[in-house]
Image: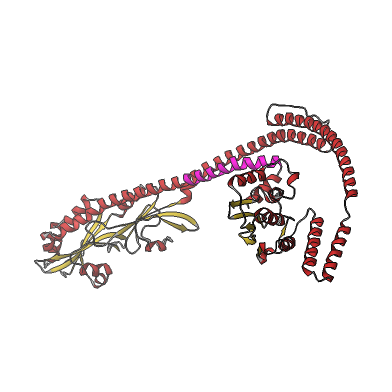
Amino acid sequence: MYTRIITFMNNLKLRTKLFLSFGSVVLIPVLIVGVFLTSELRNMAMNNALKQITANVDRVKKRTSEMLNVPVDIVYRLSNDSRLEEAANHRYESVYDVVQAYWDYPDFRDFVRLYKEVSSIRLYIDNPTVLNNWEFLQADEAVTREPWYQLALAQKGLAFWSYIPDSRNGQYYLSLIRKVDFLKQRTTGVLVVNVNSDQLSSILKQETFETFIVDENDNIVASNRAGTLGKSLQDINLKPLSTLAGHGPADITIDGQSFKMLIDDWHPEGSLNSLRIISIFSVESIVSEPNRIISLATSVIISSLILAIILIYYFSRLLTGRMLHLSKHISKVASGNLEARLVIDGKDEIGQLARQFNHMVRNVNDLMSEVQESNQQKNAILLKQNEIKFKMMASQINPHFLFNALESIRMKAHTRGQTDIAQVVRLLGKMMRKNLEVGGGRITLQSELETVNCYLVIQKFRYNDRLAYELYVDPAANTLRIPPLIIQPLVENCVIHGLEDRMDGGMVRVDIRVEEGSLTVQVSDNGTGISPARLAELRQMLENNDDYETHSIGMRNIHLRLKLTYGPECGLILASQSGYGTQISFAIPLRSDSYV
C-alpha cells in the first residue's frame, strides 16, 4: 500500500504536488481547527445556557419555596387555633348567631389581607348549623367524593399540594390541603389554602427561558408562557416529558425543533407530595449567535484559501517553468546534442541544478572522447588476441580425434576381457567430454555429480583399496541448477592433497543437503589435514585479487565464482586440523536470480 502511494505521488506533476502539499499542510489543519473551534463555540454556548437554566431553576425554586412557606405556616397555625375549633363546631340557634360568630373570627380574612401569597382560605366542616360564607363551608356529598378531600381525610394531619377548583368561582388554584382534628369536639375538618396564582406566575415571568411549575398530575400550576396556565403537559405537547424525573438536562424535540430541557423534582418543606419545575429553551436560539460567528469565520477562511490558491498557482508556474526549461535541455542532451548549454538564471536550487547540468555535459563530452579512444585500443587488442587464439586452436589436437582414440582403447580392453580398464576409459572420456562442453550457463546438480562420480571411480581404480568415498545427496537437490565445476575440483583437492600422501588411504565424503532455503555442500576427508599456518595462508589466498588466471580451475576460482554469482557471503569455508582431515563447504541460496 505504501509503495503504491509513493508510486502515485511520483507520477504526479510538480504543480499538482504543490497543490497537494498546500492542502496537506495548510488546508487540512485549517479545516480541523475550524471544525474544532466551531464545535467548542457551540458547546460553550450550550454549556453557558445550561448553567443559566440551572441557575434559573434554582432561583425559581428558592423564591417559590419562600412563597409556599406562607400557606404552610398559616395551615399549621390554624390547625392549633382553639378559636377556630369553637367557631367551626358550635351549634348555632339562629342566623344572627352564625353571622356574629363569623364577625368575631376574622383570622381567614386577616391572613388573606396580610399575605399577598394567599388568595383565599376555606374550611370544610360537617356542622349543619353553619352557613356557607366561602370561608366556612358545609362538606356536602359532592365535596366528599373529591379525590383531594378523601386523600386529606386519609392522612394523619399531613399537608399536601393539589391543583383544585375553588368552589366560589370555579377557577383552579394551587392549594395546600390538610385535615384538621378538633380534639375537644372530636370532629374533623379539611382546611384549604389557595395560593395567589398571579403572584406565583410573576416569579416565573422574570425568567428568560420558558419555565413551568407542574404538580404530580402534570397540571401546569404556574408558567411564564402565555396561555398555558391551568393546562396539562399533554395539552402543550409535552406529555412524554411527564415520565422524566431527576435534574436533567435532556434533549427533546417539539414540533420538529430541538430543545434542551431541565426538570427539577422538588419536595416543598412540610408537604406530603412534590412539585416539579420544568425549564426548556430552543437550541436554535442559543446557537444562532455562534452560527453567525461561524458563518463569518467560514467566509473569511474561504476567502483566504482562494487567495492562497491563486498565490500558490502563480508561484508553482514560476517554479515549474524553470524546471520545464531544464527538462527540455536534458532532452536535447539525451537525443545526442552534447553542445546544449543552459543559461543560469538564479542562485537557488534550480540555478545550482543548471550549473551541475552544464558541468555534467562537459564531463560527458570528455568521457565520450576517452571512451572512443579506449574502444580503439580495445579493438586493437582484441584483434591481436583473436590472432593468437586462432594460432593456438590450429596447434591443438582435434577433440573428436581424442574421444575416438579413447573409445578404441576401451573397446580393445573390453574385447580382451579387461572390463575394469574399459570402464575407467569410458568414464575418463565421459568426464573429458563434459569438461570440454562446459559453457557459461548453469547445469543441474545431478549433472555435476555425474562428473564427481566419474572422477572418484577413476581415482578408485587408481588407488584400489586406499580410497573410499561416500556420496549423500538430498533427493530434493537433484534438479537444482548450479554453476558447472564447483564440486568436482573440491573433491579432487581432497583426494590429491588429503589422501595422496597417506599410505593407508582414507575416506572422502560428499554431503549435499537442502536446509532453510539454501543448498549446503560439504566435501571432507580424513587425510593429513592442514597446519594452522598453511590454513591461514589458504584463506588469505582465497581473498587475494591478484594472480586470478593461475588459479582458474582451483579453489580460488570456485571461491570467486560463488561470490560473484551469489554474493560475498557465499564463498568457500575451510576447516582443517593436522592429522584429522580437511573440510570444505559452501552454502548458496535457492533463489533463481544471481547476485550480479
In which quadrant of the rendered view does residue 165 lie? bottom left
Magenta stretch secondary structure, dominant: helix
Color scheme of the displayed model: secondary structure
Q: Could you tell me residue 177's position as x and y percent?
A: 23, 62
Q: Is residue 336 one of those drawn in magenta? A: no
Can residue 360 be seen from the camera position used here? yes
Q: Is residue 157 above or below residue 490?
A: below
Q: Could you tell me residue 498's position as x and y percent?
A: 65, 54
Q: Could you tell me residue 448's position as x and y percent?
A: 73, 60
Query: Where does the magenta region start and end?
Result: 13-41
In the picture as drawn, the residue positioned furthest to the left comes out as 184
Q: Could you tell me residue 115's position as x and y percent?
A: 22, 51
In which quadrant of the rendered view does residue 540 lie? top right
Can residue 587 be seen from the camera position used here? no
Q: Is residue 493 left or right of residue 25?
A: right
Seen from the viewer's position, the closer of residues 503 and 376 is 503
Q: What residue is shown at x 21% (from left), y 70% (from top)?
A: 154
Q: Is residue 575 left or right of residue 484?
A: left
Seen from the viewer's position, the closer of residues 562 and 415 is 415
Q: Is residue 385 above or below residue 1?
A: above
Q: Is residue 34 one of those drawn in magenta? A: yes
Seen from the viewer's position, the closer of residues 111 and 401 is 401
